Image (tube, grey):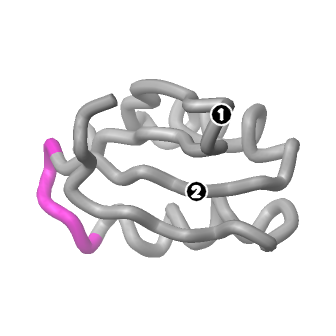
Amino acid sequence: MSQPDEVLDCRGQRCPLPVINLARRLPELPVGAVVRVLADDPAAAVDIPAWCRMRGQEFLAAHPETPAYDVRRAR
């Protein structure tokens, strides 16, 4: 597991807060930056990849053991 540019700790937050926090933070980072979202709400496993598809961002990986999700700012 490679190191992200930033870690966004959303553990303990329920849907849709992890996605909202990602949506707020990602535009502040440069294109190409990778954010690891730590989110223990089971809905995040569906919500974060779906948000990436809708917003044209790149979903890189899920790390179920953590649980964490890597997203690259594509634009």
Residue 2 magenta: no
Please give left or right for residue 40 compared with residue 30 in the image. Answer: right
The Cα–Cα distance between marks 1 and 2, rounded to whole angstroms, is 11 Å
Q: Residue at x 15, y 43 (%)?
A: 32
Pointer 1: what residue? Answer: 65
| Residue in front for this viewpoint, 1 or 33 | 1
The chief SS type of the magenta part is loop
The residue type indicated by label 2 comes to Leu
Location of residue 21 (image quadrant): bottom right
Indicate which label's residue lies in the foreground, 1 or 2: 1
Q: Quadrant of the N terminus?
A: top left
Location of residue 43 (image quadrant): top right
- First-in-chain label (1 vs 2): 2
Task: Identify whether 6 is placed above or below 28.
Answer: above
Q: Quadrant of the C terminus?
A: top left
Please give left or right for residue 57 compared with residue 33 in the image. Answer: right
The residue type indicated by label 1 comes to Glu
Instruction: Check the image and name the residue furthest to the front.
Output: 65
Q: Where is residue 60 drawn, in percent x and y?
A: 40, 26
Q: How many numbered callouts?
A: 2
Q: Residue at x 74, y 35 (%)?
A: 45
Which label belongs to residue 38?
2
10 Å crowding of disc 1: few (<14), some (14-19), many (20+): few
Please give left or right for residue 19 compared with residue 72 in the image. Answer: right
Task: Identify whether 32 is placed above or below 27.
Answer: above
Which region of the structure is painted magenta?
Answer: 28-32
Q: Where is residue 33 drawn, in percent x and y?
A: 19, 50
Which label belongs to residue 4?
none
Q: Residue at x 15, y 49 (%)?
A: 31
Q: Residue at x 39, y 37 (%)?
A: 57
Q: Where is residue 8 drawn, in percent x and y?
A: 47, 67
Task: Identify whether 59 is placed above or below 29.
Answer: above
